[in-house]
């Protein structure tokens, strides 16, 4: 579903509005907003029955695309992750629907099941302060989406690249938070299987959260969730 707001939110920051060709919040021009990776959904596309107003692309990898979004029902920034395995699917320009390549429907359905299991695992952990919250899972455009809380900051990998190494005194608090996150995960008979700087998110106001449960497994059987 694609629609335009009468008063256009800036798709880069989701804090200001476009006025006179530029954002009243971050100052970016409307032309800068148009720069997007190929095969991603267009800015201002509405998803989830019109609830989520898409902004800039936060990440685009081999299996999924992550968008900044505005949750119109709750009046807040959020993040929408779309299942988009590039080796299995494609999308035509100006068409939101995902097209599965001929003969690969079974592989795509397996990818969708894993994606939904990842979202469900995170949803069951909602409310754990040290783990990113998932608000909603839904299907649309021939694929699946899940909606997460918006986090202000950057992952530990990016933080270290920008700021250099951390002393134990600096990392002690985030490390303790990750141990609390893993305790909550293990109490639900799950293992994360991908603790790395990419998946530890350092919050701008202090603290850290564990993100990305794409490799999580059942603790008892070591099988996919």
Image (cartoon, helix red, strand yellow):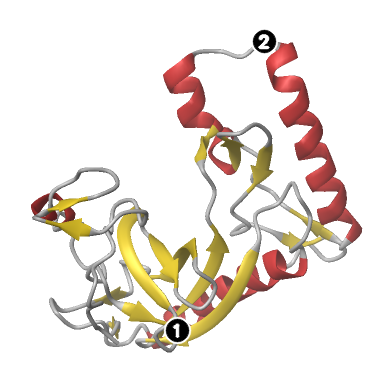
Q: Which residue is drawn at 81% across and 46% down?
A: 182
Q: Residue at x 58, y 43 (%)?
A: 199
Q: Is residue 181 left or right of residue 40?
A: right
2 or 1: mark nearer the eye: 1
Quick one: label 2 or label 1, which is nearer the N terminus? 1
Quadrant including the C terminus:
bottom right
Q: On screen, 178 above or below 43? A: above
Mark 1: few, some, or many residues within 10 Å (few <14, many ≥20)? some
Q: On screen, 199 above or below 163? A: below
Q: Where is residue 203 in the image (x, y as percent from the top left)?
A: 59, 37
Q: Position of residue 151 (x, y in %)?
A: 54, 48
Q: On screen, 203 above or below 100? A: above
Q: Is residue 12 left or right of residue 200?
A: left
Q: Can residue 162 be seen in this view?
A: yes
Element carrying mark 1: loop
Q: Position of residue 152 (x, y in %)?
A: 51, 43
Q: Is residue 213 left or right of residue 225?
A: left
Q: Residue at x 76, y 26 (%)?
A: 173
Residue topped by disc 2: 167
The one nearer the camera, 107 or 137, is 137
- Circles 2 and 1, Cβ within 8 Å, touching? The answer is no
Element carrying mark 2: loop
Q: Distance between the residues labelled 2 and 1?
A: 43 Å
Q: Position of residue 79 (x, y in %)?
A: 47, 61
The one nearer the camera, 62 or 165, is 165
Q: Can residue 65 be seen in this view?
A: no
Quadrant including the N terminus:
bottom left
Q: Residue at x 65, y 54 (%)?
A: 132
Residue topped by disc 1: 48
């Amino acid at each position: 579903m694609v629609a335009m707001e009468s008063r256009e939110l800036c798709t880069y920051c989701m804090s200001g509005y476009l006025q006179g060709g530029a954002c009243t919040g971050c100052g970016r021009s409307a032309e800068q907003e148009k720069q997007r990776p190929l095969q991603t959904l267009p800015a201002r596309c509405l998803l989830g029955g019109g609830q989520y107003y898409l902004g800039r692309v936060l990440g685009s990898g081999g299996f999924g695309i992550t968008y900044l979004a505005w949750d119109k029902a709750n009046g807040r920034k959020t993040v929408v992750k779309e299942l988009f395995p590039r080796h299995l699917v494609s999308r035509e320009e100006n068409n939101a629907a995902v097209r599965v390549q001929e003969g690969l429907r079974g592989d795509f359905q397996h990818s969708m099941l894993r994606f939904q299991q990842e979202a469900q695992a995170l949803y069951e952990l909602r409310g754990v302060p040290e783990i990113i919250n998932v608000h909603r899972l839904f299907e649309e455009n021939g694929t699946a989406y899940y909606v997460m809380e918006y986090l202000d900051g950057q992952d530990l990998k990016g933080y270290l690249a920008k700021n250099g190494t951390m002393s134990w005194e600096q990392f002690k608090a985030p490390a303790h938070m990750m141990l609390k996150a893993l305790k909550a995960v293990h109490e639900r008979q799950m293992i994360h299987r991908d603790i790395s700087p990419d998946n530890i998110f350092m919050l701008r106001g202090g603290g850290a959260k564990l993100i990305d449960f794409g490799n999580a497994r059942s603790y008892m059987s070591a099988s996919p969730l």
